[in-house]
Image: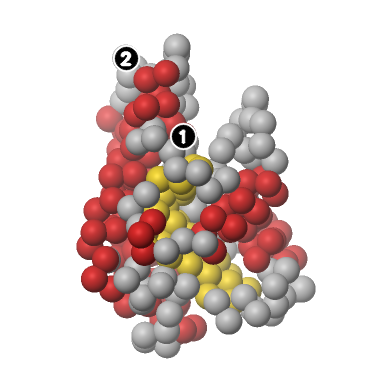
Amino acid sequence: MPTYVITGANRGLGLEFVAQLSQEASNKIIVASRSPSPEKVKDLESLKSKNKNIYILECDTSSLKSIASFASEVASLLGPQGKIDYLLNNAGINSVPDQRSLSLTSEGLQEQITVNVLGPAKTVEALQAHLHEGSVVMNMTSGLGSLTYSKSKSANSATAYSISKASLNMLTVHQSIDLKHKGVIVICMDPGWVKTDMGGKGAVLEKEESIEGMLRCLSGLTIADSGKFFVYDGHEKAW
């Protein structure tokens, strides 16, 4: 019975991960929502009503206290050394998409870094006792975090978000080094430009296709893949 832990699971790509994974009754799925309010988790509750192996917890990845509490609840569910097979750091924000390099604010940048970089860093740290040989950590990044891709664009937007995702990519490399001795695989994944609230206007990819591709890629990873940057279809992406 593989165990999945997914942050930011109450909507968008996170919710689609749960929808697809819950089709297999043997999967144990621990999901986190920033808010436990009934309105925020109603779609998760609907999926849970059909699969008793879904566990809904609260975790605000912008809060170190919330991450610590979440880790404690995960330990209660799995036992002190219980294994997480897949830790999917999906939670993220793009709260200042209109800020560009010449209009960047310290508040806007700090918010992106806190949620998109420090959040995954502290989540992995808090859950490291449950990461054993063969465990996979996926940090959800973006094509906008690729310097190669960004250089090819004629106009820039979402500068703070792009910087945070480039930073997340570097975090992924460092985590892969720090967890290598345990045999843990750490990668970052570009889901593509997906039709979600965050994807916004112009998005071209259906979330079902993106998640199906990511799960296929994740299931085929080996330790040799640790520290790499993948696209949802399994191809490596230029840094």
Query: Which amino acid is tagged 2?
Result: Leu
Residue 142, visible in the rendered structure? yes
Q: Is residue 137 above or below residue 194?
A: below
What is the crowding at mark 2: few (fewer than 14 residues within 10 Å), some, or many (at least 20)? few
Q: Are marks 2 and 1 in contact (CB under 8 Å)?
A: no
Residue marked by disc 2: 102
Disc sitting over residue 125 in the figure: none
Query: Which amino acid is tagged 1?
Result: Gly
Q: Residue at x 42, y 26 (%)?
A: 149
Residue marked by disc 1: 143
Q: Quarter-wise, where is residue 1 in the image?
A: bottom right
In the image, 230 versus 101, the foreground residue is: 230
Q: Residue 140 at x, y = what percent?
A: 46, 49
Q: Residue 156 at x, y = what percent?
A: 42, 18
In the image, 83 versus 216, the foreground residue is: 216
- Cα separation, mark 2 vs mark 1, equals 21 Å
Q: Residue at x 36, y 76 (%)?
A: 133
Q: Residue 210 at x, y = what percent?
A: 62, 46
Work out whether mark 2 precedes mark 1 in sequence or the reverse, and give the earlier one. 2
Residue 60, visible in the rendered structure? no
Q: Is residue 169 above or below residue 97?
A: below
Q: Is residue 8 left or right of residue 37?
A: left
Q: Residue furthest bottom?
A: 79
Q: Pick the quarter of the image with the C terminus.
A: top left
